[in-house]
Amino acid sequence: MTNKPPSVTANPWQSLRRFTTARIALGRAGVSLPTAPQLAFQLAHAQARDAVHLALDVEALQRQLVDAGIAGAQQCQVLDSAAGDRLTYLQRPDLGRRLSDLSREQLSDGADQEPIHDLAFVIADGLSSLAIARNAAPFLAALQRRMAARQWSLAPLSIVRQARVAIGDEVGSLLRAKLVVVLIGERPGLSSPDSMGLYLSWMPRVGMHDAQRNCISNVRPQGLGYEDAAAKLDYLLAEAHRRALTGVALKDESSSDNTQAGLPQQNFLLD
């Protein structure tokens, strides 16, 4: 009796998979992917697609924020972009960058006046409301603990539906805030349908460019953890306030980036 060769040919780089959730070293069955990785890919694709179309449950998010003890959660403002529905939002990115007329009227018009708040938080569904539902409240709780010693004036907390990053500029301007932080669901990847991004802008105003913002991405337990993300944002907030700027001129030089500097470096390819 002869032994049959295995149906799946292993990839020699398979040991590298412990370092990443990316789809590498999946092996092959003949000239195709094995069945299990193929089914896993189809599941991940469906999860990413669902994350894009899933509507944000605003009431559930508000309850999370209140339960987490987030400042201003009880008086949270719910706003809408100029994109009236999800299909319009996906087809017209420009409308997701501006508030609807009703939401603009809901905010006090202080765009042409001096700022009265140090900081405003804007929670936007973006391209993954799942990311916001899972990560916004625990992240803000971690950041709030870290910033407790600062006596900063906070603008009313805002939740914006069908929103893109730039909508924070208009909200922050109308709220008369020196700094605005937008928490937004990032475009889902095939291994990360729930990744949240953070965008920081100094003196927000309509028409700002991406080069005038700072970004911290992939905030989630399987990516950049809440405490690490809070530490990075706290550093950038302090430096932005001290130097009166954000964007390409403001670099993340926080100590958390240098914790591994004195450690011997290993080549994982030789491990």
Image (cartoon, grey):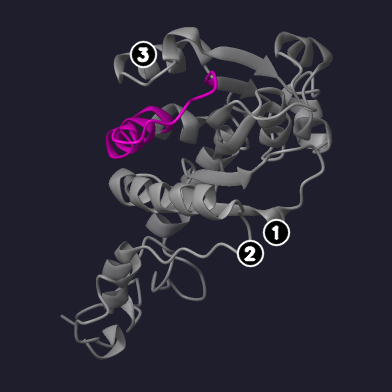
Circle 2 residues within 10 Å: few <14, some 14–19, many ≥20 = few
Magenta-drawn segment: 136-157
Percent from the top left, x then y, of residue 104?
77, 16
Label 2 close to label 1 by CB (< 8 Å): yes
Q: Mark 2 vs mark 1: which is more N-terminal?
A: 1
Above/below status of 84 relative to 59: below
As drawn, the label of residue 145 is none
C-alpha separation, residue under disc 2 versus residue under disc 1: 6 Å
Q: Residue furthest bottom?
A: 270
Question: Residue drawn at (63%, 64%), measured in percent from left and top?
Answer: 248
Element at label 1: helix
Residue type at mark 1: give it: Ala
Q: Mark 2 vs mark 3: which is more N-terminal?
A: 3
Element at label 2: loop
Name the foreground residue: 46 vs 156. 156
Residue type at mark 3: give it: Val
Q: Which residue is mark 3?
A: 66
C-alpha separation, residue under disc 3 versus residue under disc 1: 34 Å
Residue type at mark 2: give it: Val
Question: Residue drawn at (57%, 45%), measured in percent from left and top?
Answer: 199
Circle 3 residues within 10 Å: few <14, some 14–19, many ≥20 = some
Q: Quadrant of residue 71?
A: top left
Q: Which residue is mark 1?
A: 211
Q: Tell me: 28 left or right of 120.
A: left
Q: Tell whether position 152 is magenta.
A: yes
As drawn, the label of residue 248 is 2
